[in-house]
Structures are given as C-alpha cells and as structure tokens.
Image (spheres, grey):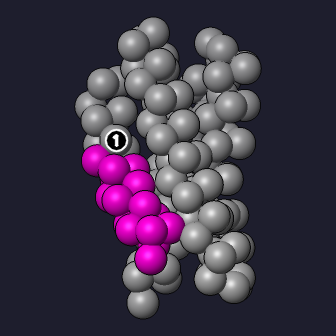
C-alpha cells in the first residue's frame, strides 16, 4: 500500500533529521524549532490520512507534502548558513523529494 510506504519513508527522514536538530539549535533556535515542527507534521499528517475518509485523507496528504517542502527549505537554509553540510542536505533533499512525490499523488487521487 502506497500510504504505508510513504509513512515508512517519512519516518526514516525524521530519524535522519533528529540528530541535526541539536546542531542547528546551537546556531539558530527558531530554525531548529521550525524544522522539528515541520518534520513532525509530515509523519503525523500521513498517519492521520491513513485513518481518514477519502476527502480528509487527500487534504492530510497535501498538508504532509507542504510540510515536507518546509523541511526541505529549513535544511537548505541550515546548509546555506553553514550549520549542516551540503551533502547532508542534498541526501535528505532526495528523500524528501520522494515523500513529496508520493504524498502529492495520494492527495490527487
């Protein structure tokens, strides 16, 4: 099932983002908090979508996609400002692109 697949992928991204939060927080508490909230939102909205009726599920998958894009932007900023390495940001960007693609397709069903 595609929604289970994206849930697992999103959790893996969160697991990779988690250790970066301390690094970012040491430089920019507000950015770290935004990154944390957005990453949590991706997984939580996917989980909510999986237990919702079709209309609400589409909305939650769309929200998850938006939150994944917010995580990407926060990681880009953290990389641009030298808080995290560009290779780390690029690796996570690829994983988030996969999450965005799947959640977007699920939102448009």
Q: Where is residue 44 shown, x and y percent of the image?
A: 69, 64
The crowding category of the residue bearing disc 1, from other C-alpha atoms within 10 Å (few below 14, some 14 to 19, many at least 20), is many
The residue located at (58%, 70%) in the rendering is 58
Q: Is residue 15 at all visible to an observer of this figure?
A: no
Q: Which sits in the foreground, 65 or 24?
A: 65
- Magenta region, main secondary structure: helix
Q: Secondary structure at mark 1?
A: helix
Q: Quadrant of the N terminus?
A: bottom left
- Left or right: 39, with 97 as reference point: right
**Residue at the outermost bottom position:** 1
Asked whether residue 98 is drawn in magenta, I would say yes
Q: Is residue 30 at all visible to an observer of this figure?
A: yes
The residue located at (59%, 23%) in the rendering is 24
Name above or below for residue 98 compared with residue 58: above
Name above or below for residue 77 compared with residue 67: above
Name above or below for residue 48 compared with residue 64: below
Asked whether residue 38 is drawn in magenta, I would say no
Q: Where is residue 36 shown, x and y percent of the image?
A: 67, 40
The residue located at (47%, 19%) in the rendering is 77
Q: Which sits in the foreground, 106 or 18?
A: 106
Q: Where is residue 37 shown, x and y percent of the image?
A: 71, 42
Name above or below for residue 26 compared with residue 11: above
* Chain part drawn in magenta: 94-109
The residue located at (67%, 53%) in the rendering is 41
Q: Quadrant of the C terminus?
A: bottom left
Q: Quadrant of residue 98?
A: bottom left
Number of numbered discs present? 1
In the rendered image, which residue does mark 1 sit on? 93
Q: Where is residue 72 shown, x and y percent of the image?
A: 45, 36
């Amino acid at each position: 099932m595609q929604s289970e697949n994206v849930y697992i992928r999103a959790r893996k991204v969160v697991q990779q983002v988690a250790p970066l939060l301390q690094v970012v927080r040491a430089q920019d508490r507000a950015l770290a908090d935004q990154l944390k909230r957005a990453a949590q939102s991706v997984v939580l909205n996917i989980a909510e979508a999986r237990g919702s009726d079709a209309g609400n599920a589409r909305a939650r998958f769309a929200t998850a996609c938006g939150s994944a894009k917010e995580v990407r932007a926060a990681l880009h900023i953290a990389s641009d400002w030298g808080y995290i390495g560009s290779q780390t940001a690029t690796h996570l960007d690829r994983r988030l692109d996969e999450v965005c693609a799947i959640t977007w397709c699920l939102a448009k069903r």
